[in-house]
Image (cartoon, helix red, strand yellow):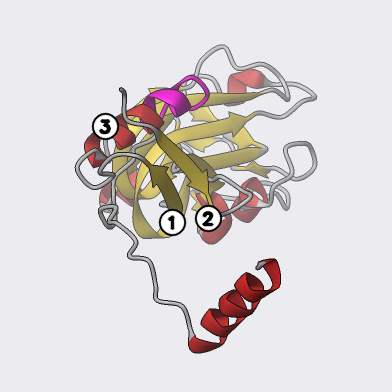
Amino acid sequence: MDKLIHLILLSGLVCIPGSLAENLAFKGTATQSSTWSGWPAQLAIDGVRKVPSCFATTSESTPWWRLDLLDYYDISTVTITARSDCCSFQTNGAEIRIGNSLENNGNNNPVCAVISNILLGQPISFSCHGMKGRYVNVVRFGFSSFLFLCEVEVYEVYRQKTFLRLKFSSSGDVAAESDEILHQLQSALASHISDFNLSWTQLPKKEEEQPKKEEEQEEDRGSCVKHL
């Protein structure tokens, strides 16, 4: 006869470790090579993706914008939003660079992506595959022009650990079957969640039956007398 194992979740809400996205740009400060007509660097990290909440440099050789995240992160994605009214050429060809160096104002850091074919007012995301860095630059090398963007968003994928408390009711030895239980639970959840990992913080153990208190024993004896 197969062993019978029932899994009882003692909480009404199930949370599984997964990926959460946070816009790191909100934590940082921004600067740029120059400022055109009251369009400062900080407007690119205010959460507003449209004109007039944008930054712009003057027309210059190699215009750049830099975000200081104030800490070191593994960056997964940078999302750029260009102005919505015109002039996408002021963004196309710009490079997104990520790293920890301020050499050449941070513009010598490794390249995540080159911005091209950006649509007016439409955010476009570039995968940086976990590049490590404190500084995120947008720079146009080889151009004598403006650099104009409405929003720069920076995302790090991180893992959140969630602990579940489980209770088992079994005709077999739950501790001995712990690996199989974990495997079955992971298989069942995998059809709904693609990126997660399960592990025991404490192996299941048999719950010893606690002796009844004297008051409970008296109640049991009284109950037996009533049924005689």
| Residue 20 spot, x, y in % from top left | 51, 42
Q: Do the residues labelled 3 and 1 touch (CB within 8 Å)?
A: no
Which residue type carries mark 1? Asp
Up/down of 82 relative to 28, above or below: above
Looking at this view, name the residue that lies furthest to the top. Answer: 117
Residue at image location 33% in from the left, 65% down from the top: 208
Q: Position of residue 130 (x, y in %)?
A: 32, 36
| Residue matched to label 2 | 30
User: Which one is nearer the viewer's eye here, 217 or 71?
Assistant: 217
Q: Nearer the viewer, mark 3 or mark 1?
A: 3
The range drawn in magenta is: 186-195
Q: Nearer the viewer, residue 77 or 117?
A: 77
Give the residue drawn at x 56%, y 45%: 14
Q: Dot 2, how many residues are within 10 Å of its Cα: few (below 14), some (14-19), or many (20+)?
A: some
| Residue that carries the numbered disc 1 in the rendered image | 68
User: Looking at the image, which residue sits at the far bottom?
Assistant: 214
Closer to us: 168 or 217: 217
Q: What residue type is labelled 3?
A: Glu
Marks 1 and 2 close (CB-CB < 8 Å) = yes
Where is residue 55 shown, x and y percent of the image? 65, 44
Structural distance between the alpha carbons of marks 1 and 2: 6 Å
The residue at which mark 3 appears reads as 180
